[in-house]
Image: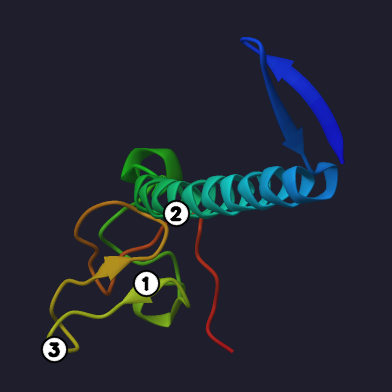
Amino acid sequence: MMLFFHNKEMHTMNDSEDFKHSRRNMLKSVAIMAGTAAVAGLAGHQTAHAASKLPQSAVKYQDKPNGDKQCDKCVQFIPGKSASADGTCKVVEGTISPHGYCIAFSPKA
């Protein structure tokens, strides 16, 4: 126990009790900051993921196949409502023809 004077009054302070309170406050603050950073990181990751698609021009997209290589045979292609309907791509922006092709082509296994 410590004694100290403040404005001519004597006060007591228990060192271990003050340490517990300050440590508790610090741990709460760290937990709150970690939670906030995690949420911000997830939100940023989703935004970055959505923005990470490449423009069609960057992958030399064309709406006709390159030999037997075409979008509906690619793992990145997301089909439309029917086999002949345009779909989308996991890595390329915009509407994608099932018969199209680009240099990001990766054959289905």
For residue 82, the mark is 3
Tell me the mark number nearer the camera, choosing from 3 and 2: 2
Question: What's the residue type where badge 1 is placed?
Answer: Cys
Of labels 3 and 1, earlier in sequence is 1
The answer for how far apart the CA atoms under marks 1 and 2 are is 35 Å
Of labels 1 and 2, earlier in sequence is 2
Residue plotted at (44% across, 71% down)? 76
Question: What's the residue type where badge 3 is placed?
Answer: Ser
Describe residue 23's horizontal placement relative to residue 106 as left or right: right
The answer for how far apart the CA atoms under marks 3 and 1 are is 14 Å
Frontmost residue, 101 versus 46: 46
As displayed, is residue 105 above or below residue 19? below
Residue identifier under label 1: 71
| Residue 85 point in image, percent of width and height | 13, 78
As displayed, is residue 4 above or below residue 93? above
Quarter-wise, where is residue 8 in the image? top right
| Residue 23 point in image, percent of width and height | 73, 48
Residue situated furthest right in the rendering: 1
The answer for how far apart the CA atoms under marks 3 and 2 are is 38 Å
Residue plotted at (24% across, 63% down)? 96
| Residue 63 point in image, percent of width and height | 25, 59
As displayed, is residue 19 above or below residue 69? above
Question: What's the residue type where badge 2 is placed?
Answer: Val
Residue plotted at (55% across, 45% down)? 33
For residue 39, the mark is 2
